[in-house]
DNA sequence: GCTTGACTTCAAGTCGACTTGAAGTTGCAA
DNA sequence: TTGCAACTTCAAGTCGACTTGAAGTCAAGC
């Protein structure tokens, strides 16, 4: 018995990747992964698919849609493990995306802890407290969350 | 003409909060926000609702469901601006959540840049490269993403 | 060769988070 | 007092990401 078979059935891939078989078939429909078939028509996945599936799940955690994931995965080879050049082609997209998301979360976090830590409920300095309200003067939406700096203490906000 | 009316119609709140009126009605249905009614039955929102809506949108960015948001918002007063004690009651939930999510993203980011920067495609050190594959020995799922440390160079992974 | 679990396709269902549409009512400015 | 945008409810529709079910086929251990 070989320790690692070279190709995986859908069930095996599902177990190893931690997703349902139905999800794998769905991903295949979207072109995110691909499989060869046995004579009888059953799927057999190259081990490289494990990485692609891990990629998909990771991307979803980041908040990317399967569509967006597809755009990235389309630039990686389906049949073999990605090499350094492959990575260099896709990584900037990812990193920028991930960085943006991290920045977003850190702004949120700062708003939250700031509210507790610094007696901020003075109506002027707290970003969350003033959220869409004073920000409305600069257009709709929770601008503070999108990178706007909060109003300075001395600045009139109309309140 | 007063600079700020004390109560907002659904359209005004929608504009200021940057969401659709239909979304506001939906949030009300879920108990995330509340409105008083005019004699004729139209909604009039207290200004505090702006903050609640901003809160909801922020939470969604973090990846929380409206259900989860509801659990947090339930601990804040509907009628008035939250004070320091209110914040202290809800903030830890948020911060933990946000922190976890940031950590997740940073792991992902590190995997990505590590893949480019350090000639990691040696099959042993790169976390993403080894993703679900070797991790399968420790249970299903992309464990590296969930906080598992990647296999050490000297460690046998069966490959 | 037979059984049994894992597989196949395809259509329909589900869930969260809204959006859209129909049909009617309200509020306010001219 | 009238005109009209903005509002009201309720039901149904949409979208992404799957899941479920039916009805049938494959692969491998006894």
Image (tube, coloured by chain):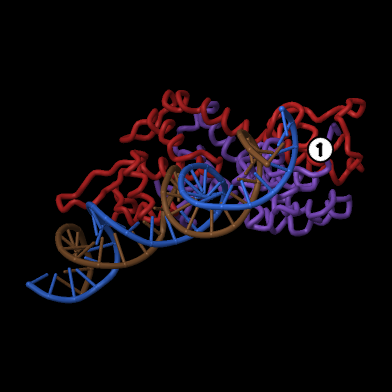
Chain colours: A purple, B red, C brown, D blue
Quadrant in which residue B35 is drawn: top left
> Observer-nearest residue: B115 or B54?
B115
Residue B159, horizontal then vertical, whole percent: 88, 34
Residue at 89% over, 27% down: B156
Kindly state the secondary structure of the residue where label 1 is placed: helix
Residue at 19% over, 49% down: B38
In this picture, is A73 found above or below B80? below
**Is residue B120 in sight in this rendering?**
yes
Mark 1 chain: B
> Observer-nearest residue: A109 or B69?
B69
Quadrant in which residue B125 is drawn: top right
Residue A107, horizontal then vertical, whole percent: 60, 40
> Observer-nearest residue: D26 or A73?
D26
Residue at 92% over, 26% down: B154
In this picture, is D12 found above or below A16? below
For this view, does A144 lie left or right of residue D27?
left
Residue pointed to by mark 1: B130
Badge 1 local density, few (<14 within 10 Å), some, or many (20+)? many
Residue B62, horizontal then vertical, whole percent: 56, 40
Residue A147, horizontal then vertical, whole percent: 60, 49
**Is residue A99 in sight in this rendering?**
no
């Amino acid at each position: 018995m070989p320790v690692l078979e070279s190709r995986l059935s859908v069930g095996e891939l599902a177990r190893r990747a931690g997703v349902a078989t139905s999800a794998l078939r769905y991903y295949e429909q979207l072109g995110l992964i691909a499989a060869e078939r046995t004579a009888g028509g059953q799927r057999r996945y190259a081990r490289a698919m494990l990485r692609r599936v891990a990629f998909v799940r990771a991307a979803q955690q980041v908040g990317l849609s399967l569509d967006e994931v597809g755009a990235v995965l389309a630039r990686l080879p389906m049949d073999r493990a990605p090499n350094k050049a492959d990575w260099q082609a896709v990584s900037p997209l990812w990193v920028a995306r991930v960085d943006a998301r991290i920045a977003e979360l850190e702004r949120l976090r700062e708003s939250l802890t700031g509210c507790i830590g610094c007696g901020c409920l003075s109506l002027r300095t707290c970003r969350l407290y003033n959220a869409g309200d004073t920000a409305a003067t600069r257009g709709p939406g929770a601008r503070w969350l999108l990178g706007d700096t909060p109003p300075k203490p001395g600045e009139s906000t109309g309140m």
